[in-house]
Amino acid sequence: MNSRILVVDDDEFIRVLMQEMLGQVGYDVEVAEDGQAAWEALDAVPGRCDLVLLDKQMPRLDGLSLLKRIRGDGRFGDLPVIILTADTSPEDVSEGLAAGAHYYLTKPSTEDVLKVVIKSA
C-alpha cells in the first residue's frame, strides 16, 4: 500500500504540481485548498494520511493554526507535518518548528530536496 500525503495549499498550481510530482514516485496524494478543508478531511477519517505537506499562509484556517490543531489532538500524535512556504525569515522557521513541524522548507524547493525530506519524515 502506498503512503498517502495530504497537500494543503491555497495555490491550485502548487496542489496540481505536488499531486503530479509525488504521484509519479508512488505516493497517493490528496489535496485541500486551505487548513479548514484539510482539518475536515483529517477529522473525518483519522489515519487516512501518512504525512501532511502544509503551506503556511492560507485563508479560513492558516497552516500554523492547522498544525497546532493537529498537534493538540492525540489522534494525530505520530502524523509528520512538513511546512512548505514562502515565509523564509528565521523567526518564521522557528515558529513553524516550535509549533510541531517535522521540517520547514521554503518555496521554491527543489524536487529532489522535497522527495528526500518526505521520505525521511
Image (cartoon, rainbow, N blue to C red):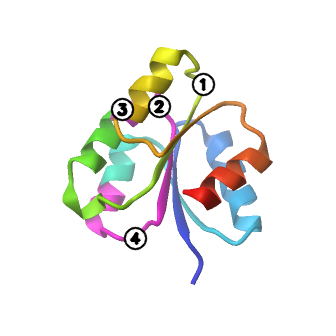
* Callout 1 secondary element: loop
Amino acid at the residue labelled 4: Arg
Separation of marks 3 and 2 at Cα, in angstroms: 14 Å
In the rendered image, which quarter is residue 12 located in? top right
* Callout 3 secondary element: helix
Separation of marks 1 and 3 at Cα, in angstroms: 18 Å
The residue carrying mark 3 is: 98
In the rendered structure, find residue 56 and report the number of the disc placed on it.
2
Verify CB contact (< 8 Å) between mark 3 and mark 2: no
Between disc 3 and disc 2, the foreground one is 3
1 or 4: tag closer to the N-terminus = 4
1 or 3: tag closer to the N-terminus = 1
Q: Nearer the viewer, residue 16 or 62?
A: 62
* x then y, percent, for residue 1: 57, 84
Amino acid at the residue labelled 2: Lys
Q: Nearer the viewer, residue 41 or 107?
A: 107
Q: Residue at x 44, y 55 (%)?
A: 80
The residue carrying mark 4 is: 48
Q: Residue at x 36, y 41 (%)?
A: 100
Verify CB contact (< 8 Å) between mark 4 and mark 2: no
Separation of marks 2 and 1 at Cα, in angstroms: 8 Å
Verify CB contact (< 8 Å) between mark 2 and mark 1: yes
4 or 2: tag closer to the N-terminus = 4
Q: Is residue 77 left or right of residue 31?
A: left
Magenta highlight range? 40-64
Separation of marks 4 and 2 at Cα, in angstroms: 21 Å
Q: Nearer the viewer, residue 78 or 75?
A: 78
* x then y, percent, for residue 87: 55, 21
